[in-house]
Image (spheres, rainbow, N blue to C red):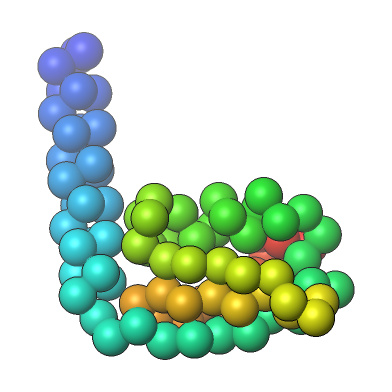
Amino acid sequence: MAEACNNQATRHDDELKAAHLARAKSPIETQLIDSRHVRDPMHLVLLLNDEYGNGNYEVEMRHNYFTIRAPGRLQWSQVYAKCR
């Protein structure tokens, strides 16, 4: 039983790594998100880590906007669900 769980977890990790690699090869896009829509910036970081992998994006805060450079764009529904 434990082996089946370990195999399943390893397969899931491999799928996540493959998805992150595919996104990392995508062209970098810039997206602005108004800080009023992000209650906790740490939630935004967690969302970005889930979507693009740690270190595959850049975030800056200027004039009450988060500027995100990443290999793709976040959907508004994702930001709303995770960051509000």
* 28 vs 60: above or below: below
Res. 27 image quadrant: bottom left
Q: Residue furthest top?
A: 2
| Quarter containing the C terminus | bottom right
Q: Is residue 23 left or right of residue 67?
A: left
Given residues 37 and 1, the one toward you in this image is: 37
Q: Residue furthest right?
A: 36
Residue at left offset 66%, top offset 53% = 43
Res. 77 image quadrant: bottom right
Q: Is residue 45 left or right of residue 66?
A: left
Residue 81 x %, y %: 68, 64
Residue at left offset 85%, top offset 73% = 36
| Quarter containing the N terminus | top left
Residue at left offset 16%, top offset 40% = 11
User: Does the image show residue 35?
Assistant: yes
Residue 17 x %, y %: 21, 52
User: Does the image show residue 76?
Assistant: no
Residue 62 x %, y %: 73, 77
Given residues 82 and 70, the one toward you in this image is: 70
